[in-house]
Image (cartoon, rainbow, N blue to C red):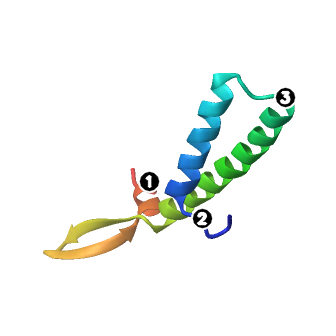
Amino acid sequence: MAKEKFEEALEKLEEIVKRMEAGEMTLEESLKAFEEGIKLSRLCAKKLDEADRRVELLLRQEGELVTKPFAEEEREP
């Protein structure tokens, strides 16, 4: 699952939620699905955190486009 793509993990998580909401799983199946869902949820959160760190804003400074990390933008008043 380490190299799994965000979209694939999210799709699997959505499928697990649908199956659990249907209420047709045994307790054992539900627990197993819940455990898998937690793993997928953590993977998705990790991928989103990685993407957030990579986001850059383009700013115009003296007629030139300059990249600036997204996090710095939050610190400005």
Where does the image place residue 48, in percent across and percent down from the top left?
53, 56
Secondary structure of the residue carrying numbered label 1: helix
Q: Earlier in the sequence, mark 3 or mark 2?
A: 2
Q: Nearer the viewer, residue 55 or 7?
A: 7
Q: Amino acid at mark 3?
A: Leu
Q: In the current view of this chain or complex, which residue is farthest to the right?
A: 28
Which mark is in front, 1 or 3?
3
Q: Work out how far the residue at label 2 is from the one at label 1, CA to CA, in angstroms.
A: 30 Å
Q: Amino acid at mark 2?
A: Glu
Left or right of 44? Residue 31 is right
Which picture quadrant has residue 26?
A: top right
Q: Amino acid at mark 1?
A: Glu
Q: Nearer the viewer, residue 67 or 34?
A: 34
Q: What residue sits 67% from the left and 68% below the top?
A: 2
Identify the residue under disc 1: 74
Which mark is in front, 2 or 1?
2
Q: In the current view of this chain or complex, which residue is farthest to the left?
A: 63
Secondary structure of the residue carrying numbered label 2: loop
Query: Is residue 47 among the parts visible in the rendering?
Result: yes
Q: What residue sits 62% from the left and 70% below the top?
A: 3
Identify the residue under disc 3: 27
Identify the residue under disc 2: 4
Q: Dot 3: few (<14), some (14–19), or many (≥20) neighbours within 10 Å?
A: few
Where does the image place residue 47, in percent across and percent down from the top left?
57, 60
